[in-house]
Amino acid sequence: MKVTELILNKLYDPRLKGVDVNSSELLKVHQRILEEKPLMRHVFTHFYTECKNNSERYFIQGGKEIEIGAGVSFFKSIFPTIISTDIKLSPGLDQVLDAQNMDIASNSVSAFYGINCFHHFPNPQLFFDELNRTLIPGGGCVLIEPHWGSVASMMYKRLFKTETFDKNAEQWQSDATIMTGANQALSYLVFKRDFEKWQNDNPNLELIKIEVLNNYLQYLFSGGLNFRSLFPFWMLPVIRLKEIILRPFNSFFGLHTLIVIRKRI
């Protein structure tokens, strides 16, 4: 076994060992882990705030606000107008929703929010077609996805056996199920490598913004939802200071990219 695998196995939360990643049991364990990790909750609060702030800045308001791929999200506990959805039922969800085939009226949504879910879509073009159909003119979608910089590319290739990180994949489509087979580099393929194709295939959508988020040390040290925490929450000011100092190197060290898409008026 490689040294990297030994370290990851040591850090992996023991409560997740043997849990089927496509089962409802995974959500229950993730919920307990999230409740026990204040640093992780702080990271997600930052994600939710970034989503909401970008929505208010770039999108026309007035329609529904829908979170897709919510899982154990607490987005709507901070912003009560959010409708939380996922492809499978779990406690706290408002609706079961397939982002590639949405049971939502046309021209009725002002904002979609998706955190670490886009790369799980087997056919992302179906999702873009649904954005075009369901969004009001001037409405949009905020995605937070794995970044594709040097550190992220190295790390994501090794983190999960159930997902890949293939920046050389020939096509966007995959054999992904709910939690297996996804290509974590999908946002790179679509919005970086094949951006011209995305524009041509989606003339009614425009890419407004791509930004590398600056909370990568918090995310890494929190352990996420699958690994043990490396530092206690009281060290947050020190961690945040280091992130601020390293801000000029976000594209190199960053772990998540924020993507803002808007439907043309």
Image (cartoon, grey):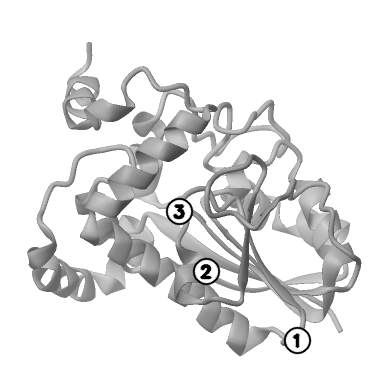
Q: Which residue is mark 1?
A: 62
**Which is more foreground, mark 3 or mark 2?**
2
Mark 3 nearby-residue class (10 Å; few <14, some 14–19, many ≥20): many
Per the image, label 2 sits on a secondary structure element best described as: helix
Q: Which residue is mark 2?
A: 76
Q: Amino acid at mark 3?
A: His
**Of 179 and 153, the residue lying toward us:** 179
How far, Cα to Cα, is label 3 from label 2? 25 Å
Q: Which residue is mark 3?
A: 147
Horizontal side of 54 relative to 235 (left or right) equals right
Mark 1 or mark 3, earlier in chain: 1
* Residue drawn where x is 54% and y is 43% of the image: 185
Mark 3 or mark 2, earlier in chain: 2
Outermost residue, front side = 91
Residue 24 placed where, x, y %? 51, 32
Q: Amino acid at mark 2?
A: Lys
Residue 14 placed where, x, y %? 23, 26
Residue 170 placed where, x, y %? 69, 32
* Residue 58 picture quarter: bottom right
Horizontal side of 240 relative to 206 (left or right) equals left
* Residue drawn where x is 23% and y is 60% of the image: 39
Q: Quadrant of the N terminus?
A: top left
Mark 1 nearby-residue class (10 Å; few <14, some 14–19, many ≥20): few
Per the image, label 1 sits on a secondary structure element best described as: loop
